[in-house]
Amino acid sequence: MTSPSPAIAALNLTLTLGNGPGAVEILKGIDLAVPVGQALALLGPSGSGKSSLMAVLSGLERATSGSLSVAGENFAAMDEDALALARRGRIGIVLQAFHLLPTMTALENVATPMELAGMADAQPRARAELEAVGLGHRLSHYPAQLSGGEQQRVAIARALAPRPLLVFADEPTGNLDAATGQSVIDLLFARRAEMAASLVIVTHDAQLATRCERVITLADGRIASDTMA
Amino acid sequence: MTAALPWSAAWRIARRDLSARFRGLRLLLVCLFLGTGALAAIGTLTASIERELAGRGAAILGGDIEAEVWQRGATAAESKALAALGTLSAGTRLQAMASAGEADAPVALKAVDQNWPMIGALKLKDGTRVRAPPPGGVWLAEGAAERLGVAPGGAIRIGSQTLKVAGIVAEEPDSLSEGFALGAVAIVRSDFPASAGLMAPGSMYRTKLRVLLRPGTEPKAAIERLKAAFPDAGFRYRTRDKAAPGAERFIENMGQFLVLVGLAALAIAGIGIGGGVSSYLEARRGSIATFKVLGATSGDIARIYLLQIAAAALAGSLAGLTAGVLITPLLASALGTLLPVQTGFVFEPGALARAALFGLLVALVFAAPPLLRAKLYPAMALMRARVSPLAPAWRAMAIPVGLGVAGIVALALVTAADWRLTAGFLGGAAALLGLLAALGWAISRGAARLPRPANPLLRIALSYLHRPGAQTGALVTALGFGLSAFVLLAAIETSLSANIAKRIPARAPDYFVLDVPRARAAEFVAAVRETVPGADVRTVPAMRGAILAYGPPQQMTWVADLKALPENAWALRGERGLTYSADVPEGNVVTSGKWWPQDYAGEPLVSVDEDLAKAIGLRLNDRIVISLLGVERAARISSFRRIEWDSLGFNYVLVYSPNAISDAPHNLAATIDLPAGAAKTGLLRKLVRAFPASSVIETGALLRDARALLTQMSVAILAAASVTVLAGIAVLLGAIAAARAARLYDTVILRVLGASRRQLLLLQLAEYGLLALILAGVALALGSFIGWLVMTRMFEFDWLPDWPSVLGVLGGGLAMVLGFALAGSLPLLRAKPAQALRDL
């Protein structure tokens, strides 16, 4: 029996932002393999490159060099549009600042990625997902009418509704108080477990990291440690 | 899963993302509304007038072709040849005096035969439709009837005959083709002028011969046949295609001006539209990034936002088109009697489609760059852009923007009445944009190199001009165009007023008298002086002739061979007034050559207006050939003269030596200057009685009419130019709104850091004040230059702006800019920092 191909396989990834003398080297040769269904925490101090690594792994940023395969797709060879297509339905992303579309209701926000992917049942699935995250009574509310915790729950519902293979979360509790943050994290872990999706979570919270099966610590753009729970 | 988002799904998402009240897109809406509205109104008006003139050509001319000749009737051979082409209607036009009881009035006498009118009918005030008047009767225009105090059934006297007023004219079918006349029309039978003694040799009358051609005969072919048969007849021909050349020329000139105004409004509105689209998409950058995070491709994003912009553009354009159609009657009413035809609510699909297409193309051109940025930059870069601005994607933009601009240029040129004028305008507008862009760059660079001021507010204000992501370029372009529009309007307005004051002389002769018999010249002068002692009477021989050819004897240029008249060579068009004189006419100065001696008897000589000489390249000793009463006469040019046209007297482009033309039958024209304070009592009455074949015109009424005409023209020009100012204001507002959005982040942070409202207001004031001061100079130069072009090149008025007023208006514009800038900041300053931070 052969082992299944990893959800993420990265080799010697680098990321440099800017040009010339102002160029900044953010990632300096990252090698990483994440098996399907694994929950991985990226830890590290500010500026260590953990959010940038997540952006590259999720296809939000293109690596400057190195090879990267995500969900069987060769991300390193893709342009912006191909990366967007590759994300559709397979990758769910939760960001620290929520990034909900301010002009759309909660239901519309959750339905949009599925509509972009051409799913016919986008609306009922969005409704079901919002009910699953406890926001069945907030379907027609706009982001400005929701609390921070509610907004992040909408963001989680939006990321998980298409049933992705991979979920990325960048400091998902960074903008929330401790109690709300805890409930949001419980929700995130519970929902992704139901779906058996891989999870990459960026955090500086060591306590939160312990809930993952694997913890990678970054320092100065390099992997400083890689431990299994 | 599909690669490209279907349009229906894109529209569903676009509609969700689009605020019902077009929040963020209002500037785009306003600019499109103004731009397309102006173009629609202007296009609708000119197209409907042109169509009216073209469609009613035969009715306006009163036939398919017309042959006109001065001071003679048609010969039997000419009448026979004309009659052979179809139905002939012959008539006469001349200036005459009508009197009834104690009242006198100049009238435009129109003598018509039984075939008149060959198309349509004359409509009387009582609603009846009639043809030529009954024997001994006259159809009298309302103005003349009022002045003479007569009603149908009353009697008036013209020349030596009494006529019965048979009816008052309501609508004259061929009035447009008659041209300018001193006095209202009086329509009589064709035998009347001769029987009333008005057609003595030398009298100034025109014979009009109109033919309704047999089916199948082309007007141009018929005219060619007549030209070949009567090469020396001196006829001036017209066809139904050019029924009212005077009116068409005016419409063409006014149409060109209006088209330029429309293009200017659209160019200024285009900047506003561009600013509106850019700032809208800039504000949506976060949403665009989120769409990318959620898996939207650049094609999906382009579809979503193109649909949004198209929806707003469509709404703005439709509102503009509706306003354009609704405003057309108002524009027509501002132009008033300057227009040859009346237009109500009209619908010109071509003009409206053109206006809408222009608006949409401009919107698309400006939407391309931000959408391309969305395509080229990763989602994370778009999210970081607020603090780390994205570099413009020049290479990627070149093709779509270039194609869009090419589309706009092609549409402007293809639909232009005068492609040279339009090309010139487009070139000028592009040059201006380039100039302002260069200025913006220079200001930005200059600000970066200045030493940092110690005052923190000034330091920040200065940094706003040059830091990455600064709005300096957009602000300079918008403020430059907007303030220039203010200067332009003020300069044109004050120039027009000064022209009216200058062109209507304070002191003009009290009377003009036409057709004074030459043999009774002394009697005429004596009659005037007897009635008003001390009156100054001047008489000049008055004839009419057409210039046939000019140039060196061996290389004469024949006017008939010219495809188009050279610029300013209006004297070559048709018959013009001629005179002869032993002395240099008063108010004229010989600028080169020599005047002939008093008793000159040699080769026929002529002195020519120096402006005409320049226009057609004449030199001393060249020849000019004219047709005078059907006879060709050649003369050598012995001098050029400068004419003071503003002196309201008799001024002639061609003045001959007496021996050259004095043998032709002719009458005299006279001016009468009364001594200051002298009563006019009885003079007009006495002259009308003693010289019944002469026309006496009081200048008071003439000056009033001229002033009214110029004032109306000035109102029309100003009304049209105001559109550009409206567009300019919209652009100013838009640019300030866009810049404010870009300042939002900084202002909130500064508030959080403890900046007071006063400090923040001062900051805005410093930035805009600095820019406005620099641009005031640019606007003054730019607006003045365009104003000068419009006044002197397009309308041939003098350039006489009142600079204090212009500067005052510019100051008002600057105050408005600062007012808008400060007013725009107030909501931001009133907001609590925590609230503002949440909204960032």
Image (cartoon, helix red, strand yellow):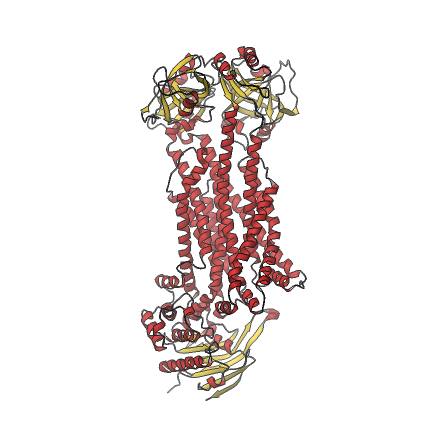
- Residue drawn at 47 percent across, 67 percent down: B286
- Residue drawn at 36 percent across, 80 percent down: A195
Does residue B364 appear anywhere in the picture? no
Please, is residue A165 above or below residue B820 in the view? below
Please, is residue B186 above or below residue B792 in the view? above
Q: Position of residue B524 (x, y in %)?
A: 54, 13
Q: Position of residue B690 (x, y in %)?
A: 49, 12
Q: Report the residue that reaches farthest toward the bottom.
A: A229
Image quarter of residue B57: top left
Q: Nearer the viewer, residue B122 or B803?
A: B803
In the rendered view of the protein, which quadrant contains the N terminus of chain B?
A: bottom left
Please, is residue B621 above or below residue B803 in the view? above
Q: Position of residue B783 (x, y in %)?
A: 57, 45
- Residue drawn at 61 percent across, 41 percent down: B803
- Residue drawn at 54 percent across, 50 percent down: B482
Q: Position of residue B795 (x, y in %)?
A: 53, 36
